[in-house]
Image (cartoon, helix red, strand yellow):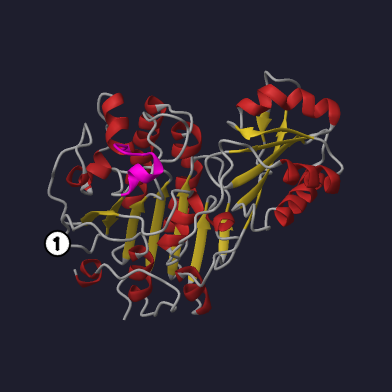
Amino acid sequence: MKKFKRIFVIVIDSVGIGEMPDAAKFGDAGTNTFVHTAERCGGLKVPVMNSLGLGDLAPVLGTSKVAHPNAYCMRLREASAGKDTMTGHWEMMGIYTTKPFITFTDTGFPKELIDQLEKETGHKVIGNKAASGTEILKELGEEQMRDNSLIVYTSSDSVLQIAAHEGTTSVPELYRCCEIAREICMKPEYYVGRVIARPFIGTCAADFKRTPNRHDLAVSPSGITAMNILQDNHYMVSCVGKIGDIFNQVGVVKTQKTVSNVDGMNKTIDEAKNHDFEGLCYVNLVEFDSEYGHRRNPLGYGKCLEEFDGKLGELIACLKEDDLLMVTADHGNDPTYTGTDHTREKVPLLVYSKSFKNGRYLDERATFADIGGTILKNFSLKKSSNMIGEPIEELLND
């Protein structure tokens, strides 16, 4: 018998809560996104997350330990090898990744890849380095417009991004070039997780801005996920934000793109208020990572957390007795750390239901996949042999 009719999983992208035991191997010893952000901000005003037990997980300045009978809280370790978006999200749904996706943050893409991309697309490639998506437009946008070239850049994720002006290089043409790049990047020596089209508009470096016509071309998950099993058994899998792209639409029943964290939360609130589905609503809120973590902006990061906390309160107010809410993250991105890379961290898991009576702090779990394991057991479904993760029994027995 299923206990909860609807389960909402919200990924506050990159909001880690302390170094993993193997963080030093990734160059991330001592990182703690939540704690260090709060310290740099002089404390965070996050009363909703505090009421769900955030203060039990770490000394986050501005929070305190309180009774939270309607919420369970715990930390999750990442079992997979990596600290990127796809690895983290896939693990939540049961995939154990032993070989990290290849990244090109420090070197740019190999000459052989770029040469092949130029030959097959018919466009010159410029850039070819790790960069902020907005800064590289200021640097190279005018040159791209002049020459109808392709701005190729990457980040700390396994991603090849191609930017082009919509008025110079049409959106369909940019998509065609990205399809070519996706095929090239399937080679094992490259094996990039995502290729992303990044169209932009504007007249000059001072006013260039990216448009909503972003298009992601991801590799499909390496095995069956909890989403596949839900879909196969006729449950809803409603995805908000970039979830659909991360899973290459595999296991996705419904998807909605977003333009901001607030937009993502508003769409989630609409799902909770107006859609009487059975199954999963899976949400990614990317701005913590993209706008503040990679740009090492702890003050902006803190404001973003406070803004999210307010919207989280709005969502909780419209949840029903048989709804379950999980708030978690996919990796860290400590905005006080060196460089611009993700950080190898544990993540928080705050779990709320109006039906809970015995909410409390729970011991650390060995994998993000216990989220998927809990979802499947709730709906009396069995995981595939390729999947990891066990149900968090306390959530289903309260």
Q: Decide whether residue 94 is among the magenta residues.
A: no
Indicate the amino acid at tag 1: Asn
Q: State the residue position of label 1.
A: 358
Identity of the residue drawn at 33% across and 69% down: 374
Q: Quadrant of the C terminus?
A: bottom left
> Residue 293's image quarter?
top left
| x and y, in percent, of residue 188 in the image | 64, 58
The answer to whether one can see residue 202 in this image is no
Identity of the residue drawn at 55% across and 51% down: 242
Residue sitting farthest toward the top = 206
> Residue 248's image quarter?
bottom right
Task: Say which of 196 and 110 sits in front.
Answer: 110
Which SS type dominates the magenta stretch? loop
The answer to whether one can see residue 12 in this image is yes
Task: Say which of 203 and 388 sits in front.
Answer: 388
| x and y, in percent, of residue 102 in the image | 56, 50
Identity of the residue drawn at 58% across and 31% down: 132
Total number of numbered discs in the rendering:
1
> Residue 363's image quarter?
bottom left
Residue sitting farthest toward the right = 122
Determine whether 2 is above or below 13 in the image.
Answer: below
What kind of element bears circle 1? Answer: loop
Magenta-tinted stretch: 22-32
